[in-house]
Image (spheres, rainbow, N blue to C red):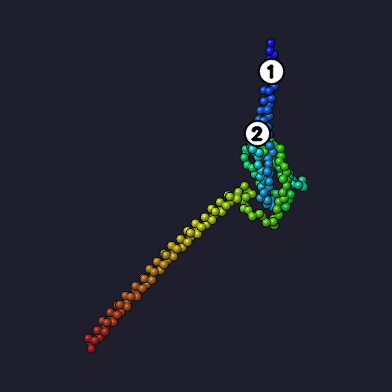
Amino acid sequence: KINLLPHLSSLGLFTMSLMCVSVCVSTAVPAAPVNVSVTQLRAHSAMVTWNVPQGDTVIGYSISQQRQDGLMQRSIREVNTSSRWCVLWDLDEDTHYSVQVQSVGLHGDSQPSRPVHFRTLERTDHYPAQGPNLGLGMTPHLQTGELLIITTVLLLWAAVIALFCRQYDIIKDNDSNGTKEKAKRPLVQPSSSYYNLHRASSSISIIRV
């Protein structure tokens, strides 16, 4: 007789191992975000950006914001979004903060990212040479496009105004010429009549003599 129990036991253990691996993979939480950075620093706002490791299923994010003196802590959580940035508002000027980001998955949150430290600007500090709306999620390319649109609109308006002024000058010149011609016509007729009348009176005076 061939004893199949060892083989069945090995097959059963292998199947259970596969099931365990598949369950563990399906219920695994995503990895912590990477490349976390703080940009667009202002006196009362800053923008946090990060990346998500490839292959992770992420449905949102959670951000922990804390002052380094421990006087204030804040948590921001948003789901059903694929955003990889968030704007921090209502910050105190010239203050040190630290921020950490977590990815929100279908089965839980990831581990927090490494803390990133930053300091907000003072009101007297000069902002970086970037657009004032970049803190709202606007990229430099988008702002360049907006500047091109505004410039084009201004040029079109300037062309329309110049054309209008040119047409107005032409109409004004035509009206001026017409007025001058009307003013000259009455002056010619009286002189001719006066000349004819003078000739007639002269001839009459000659006949009387």
In the image, farthest residue toward the front: 1
For marks 1 and 2, the one nearer the N-term is 1
In the image, farthest residue toward the top: 1
Residue placed most toward the observer, 209 or 27: 27
Residue 68 against residue 80 in the figure, above or below = below
Judge whether residue 89 can be spotted in this image: no
Residue 32: percent from left, percent from top: 69, 38
Numbered tag placed on residue 7 in the rendering: 1
Amino acid carrying mark 1 in the image: His
Within 10 Å of disc 2 (Cα), the crowding (few <14, some 14-19, many 20+) is some
Residue 177 against residue 20 in the figure, above or below = below
Q: Quadrant of the C terminus?
A: bottom left
- Residue bearing the label numbered 2: 106
**C-alpha distance separating marks 1 and 2:** 38 Å
Residue 126: percent from left, percent from top: 67, 56
Numbered tag placed on residue 169 in the rendering: none
Q: Is residue 12 left or right of residue 187?
A: right
Q: Secondary structure at mark 2?
A: loop
Judge whether residue 184 can be spotted in this image: yes
Q: Secondary structure at mark 1?
A: helix
Residue 38: percent from left, percent from top: 68, 47
**Is mark 1 in CB contact (under 8 Å) with mark 2?**
no
Residue placed most toward the observer, 71 or 197: 71
Residue placed most toward the observer, 93 or 35: 35
